């Protein structure tokens, strides 16, 4: 079983930026229910 320091729920703009910011010092997992990240970004 893999272990992570931080779990981020949601792959929207804020979740993606939080994962990037935290990944420098921690093991991060980003959980998203849709098949792609940042889906709402494609609408703008």
Image: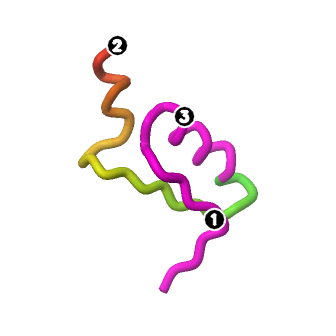
Mark 2 to mark 1: distance in Å? 30 Å
Residue reaching furthest to the right? 25
- In this view of the protein, which residue sits in the foreground, 9 or 25? 9
Decide: is 12 above or below 41.
below
Residue 4: x, y in percent? 60, 71
Q: Which of marks 3 and 1 is in front?
A: 3
Q: Is residue 26 magenta?
A: no
Question: Which residue, given by chain and number where applicable, does mark 1 sit on?
Answer: 27
Tell us which disc is closer to us: 2 or 1. Answer: 2
Task: State whether residue 38 is above or below residue 36.
Answer: above
Residue drawn where x is 58% and y is 78% of the image:
3
- The answer to which of marks 3 and 1 sits earlier in the sequence is 3
Q: Position of residue 22 (x, y in %)?
A: 68, 50
Location of residue 12 in the rendering, given as x and y in whole percent from the top left corner:
44, 36
Task: State the SS at label 2.
Answer: loop
Q: How crowded is mark 3: few (under 14 residues within 10 Å), some or many (20 or more)?
A: few
Question: In the image, is 37 to the left or to the right of 10?
Answer: left
Distance CA(mark 3)–CA(mark 1): 18 Å
Provide the secondary structure element on which disc 1 rests.
loop
Residue furthest out toward the top: 44
Which residue ends up furthest to the left in the rendered image? Answer: 35
User: What residue appears at the point 42 percent right and 56 percent down from the top-left corner?
Assistant: 31
Residue tagged 2:
44
From which residue to which does the magenta span run?
A: 1-22
């Amino acid at each position: 079983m893999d272990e992570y320091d931080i779990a981020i729920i949601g792959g929207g703009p804020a979740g993606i930026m939080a994962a990037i910011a935290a990944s420098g010092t921690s093991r991060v997992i980003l959980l998203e229910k849709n098949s792609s990240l940042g889906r709402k970004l494609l609408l703008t």
